[in-house]
Amino acid sequence: MKTGNNETLFSAVDTSSLVDKVEINLLNFFESNKLQPGDLIPKEIELASAMKVSRTVIRESLNRLKTMGIVESVKHKGTIIKSPDFSSLLQKSMIPRILDNTTLKDIFELRLVLEIGMADLILKNVTPEDIRELEEIVEKEPELSEDVLFEINHEILFHGKLYEITKNKTLKNFQHILLPVFNYVYDSGLINRPISKKKYVSHIGLIEVLKTGDADKFRKAMRKHLENHFERLFD
């Protein structure tokens, strides 16, 4: 018997479980039938018959989809398609202590990019009352020395208000998800690399630019405000 390369003698083994396969089948069914939130899906017994599996397998697959927020059971109605809560799904896995350093750094970088990129939304929705609230936050901030570039609680208050001004619910929720990672990265010393310049646009400077109504100027000012964070990240 000629053995040769064993890879040519055997086909790859499908290691996915029956529940995995049914879950994929269900997702494909939702997609191919263009089901929308609120639409009913077939009953368990119908799905089991169509896929030739037990109702137990169907039920376990549906429970997975319920955990993901893709379907939900409605009393006296059945199981319907649901619009998943993106923020909730992400928050369940955003546990800083079990994320590796590369992922933590990536998430920290994502936060910086988001805050620079949301300038247009901020300038579109900002009101005089919003500016007054930002000024009140700044009035309560301590003076920063050459050694202390920001105070974390005031940083959260100020930037949290900016997220709120965008009027984008997903962005606002995303900020709450990123905050534990943001704090953990600083406390862990992951980006505690000495910086050479310590120059940045202050919160007061951002407010002054905000008053001009120019999104491009605000975007550039925010980039300079975050300059020291970027310098810690890049060699």
Image (cartoon, rainbow, N blue to C red):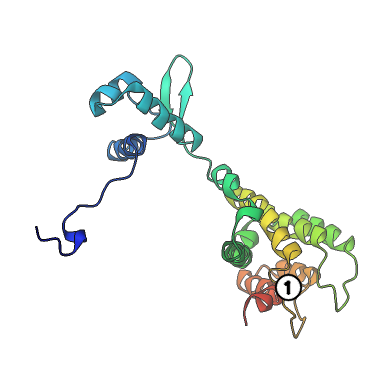
Number of numbered discs on residues: 1
Residue at 73% x, 68% y is: 189
Q: Residue at x 61, y 64 (%)?
A: 101
Image location of residue 17, percent across then percent down: 34, 38
Question: Position of 29 compared to 215: left or right?
Answer: left
Can residue 1 be seen here? The reply is yes
Residue in front for this viewpoint, 30 or 168? 30
Q: Nearer the viewer, residue 104 or 5?
A: 5
Instruction: Tell which residue pokes out farthest to the top in this image.
Output: 76
Tell me the crowding category of disc 1: few under 14, some 14 to 19, or many 20 or more residues within 10 angstroms, Cα based.
Answer: few
**Residue found farthest to the left:** 1
Percent x, y for residue 111? 62, 62
- The three-letter code of the residue at mark 1 reads Asn
Q: Is residue 40 visible?
A: no
Q: Position of residue 138 (x, y in %)?
A: 84, 63
* Residue ID at (44%, 35%): 65
- Residue 18 percent location from the top left of the image: 32, 35
Q: Residue furthest bottom?
A: 196
175 left or right, relative to 2: right
Residue found 75% across the figure and 55% down from its top: 130
Q: Quadrant of the N terminus?
A: bottom left
Whether 91 is drawn above or below 68: the answer is below
Report which residue position mark 1 lands on: 192
